[in-house]
Image (cartoon, rainbow, N blue to C red):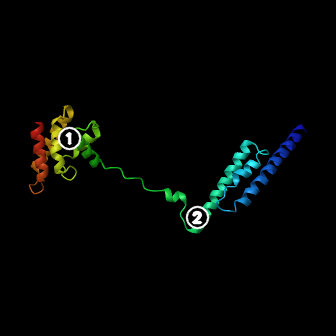
Amino acid sequence: MVKQKRKGLERTAKESKKQKITPAEETPRASEARPGKEAASPVVQEASPELSPEERRVLERKLKKERKKEEKKRLREAGIATAQTAKVQTPPAKPSAAVLALEYLQGWAEKQESWRFQKTRQTWLLLHMYDEDKVPEQHFSTLLDYLEGLRGSARELTVQKAETLMQELDGTDPKARSLGKMQRLRQVLQLLS
């Protein structure tokens, strides 16, 4: 019996909340028929004595959502893309590894104060130094100067790789050999040996 009375009281409380919200929701819809006017927040403020802060926030969210829908509908009718699709653009392309490595090498050559050792750039340079397309001739002389300062295992590995590449090229058909690559290999071996 007591539970039934409580349920009855809960229903009346919920119904009264709905009644409080319903008039406030209907009023902004009528005022929103006029495009470009922000009349929702004053209506919510007028209903504030009747609504709790949580109910007010919920009502504001609903109204904002409805305004966005109407705005999208108007834009669609006008044939204009929505703001979200207009904002989507391709991000600027990152510089390639070759560009970054060559800039690193130029920074070293100019002894810039901002130059710092970067293992990834050095590794890229050591892997691609025999390729004339990736490391142009104008940068190769700078790279040779850079290789003079090479120390430790990097120096040893570079010499070993150069020797194995030279042996591979000696064993191939003379027509298939790249003269530029052979010349670069010889220069590196002379410098580091």
Residue at the top extreme of this rendering: 152
Q: Residues within 10 Å of mark 2 (few under 14, many from 20)?
A: some
Residue at (65, 53) in percent of width and height = 64
Residue 45: x percent and y percent? Answer: 73, 48
Work out how far the residue at label 1 is from the one at label 2, CA to CA, in angstroms: 56 Å
In the displayed structure image, the side of residue 94 where residue 110 appears, left or right: left
The residue pinned by badge 2 equals 75
Q: Residue at x 75, y 54 (%)?
A: 25
Image location (x, y in percent) of residue 27: 76, 56
Q: Residue 151: x and y, percent?
A: 19, 32
- List the residue tagged with mark 1: 109
Residue at the image position 80 percent from the left and 49 percent from the top:
20
91 with respect to 35 (left or right) = left
Instruction: State the quadrant of the C terminus.
Output: top left
- In the picture, the disc for residue 12 is none
The answer to which quarter of the image holds residue 157 is: top left
Amino acid type for the residue under numbered disc 1: Ala
Quadrant location, the N terminus: top right
Q: Nearer the viewer, residue 67 or 182?
A: 67
Disc with the residue nearer the chain's start (1 vs 2): 2
Residue toward you, 42 or 70: 42
Q: Amino acid at mark 2?
A: Leu
Q: Are marks 1 and 2 in contact (CB under 8 Å)?
A: no
How crowded pointer 1 is (Cα within 10 Å; few <14, some 14-19, many 20+) is rated as some
* Number of numbered discs on residues: 2
